[in-house]
Image (cartoon, rainbow, N blue to C red):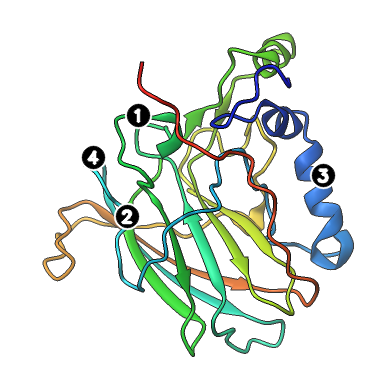
Amino acid sequence: MGQRTTDSHNEVVLMAGSLGVSALVCLLNNGDLGQTETQANLLGPFWREDQPLCASGDTLVRSTTPGPALVVDVRVEDGAGRPVQGAEVDVWHSSPEGLYENQDPTQAEMNLRGRFLTDADGRFHFKSVKPAGYPIPIDGPVGELVKATGRHNYRPAHLHFMIYQPGFKTLISQIYVPDDEHLDSDVQFGVTRALIGDYVRHDEPEAKLGFKAPWYSLDQRFVLERGEARRPRPPIRSKVEAR
């Protein structure tokens, strides 16, 4: 696994997820130490710590990225339902072709990535494209494990969020698309009922947003737990180079 890990790929993180270890540790350490449902989920191997700061309403699309348009409204609250102002929220996801920006030299630097600050109402919104499910890399030890256990190597479509605010536990989450065919058989064991988002399909164009039909919208509420705010160590640091 160490030999397969580079600045743009982390085989160790990939293996931990494929064994179910990451999901188990996440569930045991969140939701009142495993007593309740939690919105916490896997960090995954593709987060970058240098994602650009964006204004509310900005788009994550930085290069030509075909696919249905998506608009996401986010609200961040504490356990009493009060808005959390000034929280830093990293957002990232794969392209509709199933590749993260760092995996795909044809995508612009930081495509489908951004960092936002919540306003006084704990809110922000952004535009992007609807993510797609994708196969995890299987050209290393993880692939040998998946093949030996007779499993497919697909993850269901999802958006990644990481919410950082002093005084609260850093919330790392994934919000899954409900119509994905691999929702019940995620190779990384990440899906729970609390993480399935309400992605609403719209079959009429939206002139104000400049969206053609069909397009999608998602209203997502996150609840933070009191605790220590810590940023994780980034699993990758660079983009794969074109060959």
Label 3 or label 1, whichever lies nearer to me, is 1
Q: Nearer the viewer, residue 34 or 184?
A: 34
Residue that badge 4 annotates: 66
Q: In this view, does 20 lie to the left or right of 160?
A: right
Query: Residue visible at 76% across and 44% down?
Result: 23
Ranked by sequence position, the earlier of labels 1 and 4 is 4
Three-letter residue code for mark 1? Pro
Q: How many numbered marks appear?
A: 4
Q: Distance between the residues labelled 3 and 4?
A: 35 Å
Q: Work out which quarter of the rendered image holds the N terminus and state it.
A: top right
Where residue 145 sits in the image (x, y, percent)?
73, 15
**Mark 1 or mark 2, which is nearer the start of the sequence?**
1
Proximity of marks 4 and 2: CB atoms separated by less than 8 Å: no
Identify the image quadrant of residue 53: bottom left
Q: Mark 1 points at which residue?
A: 105
Q: Earlier in the sequence, mark 3 or mark 4?
A: 3
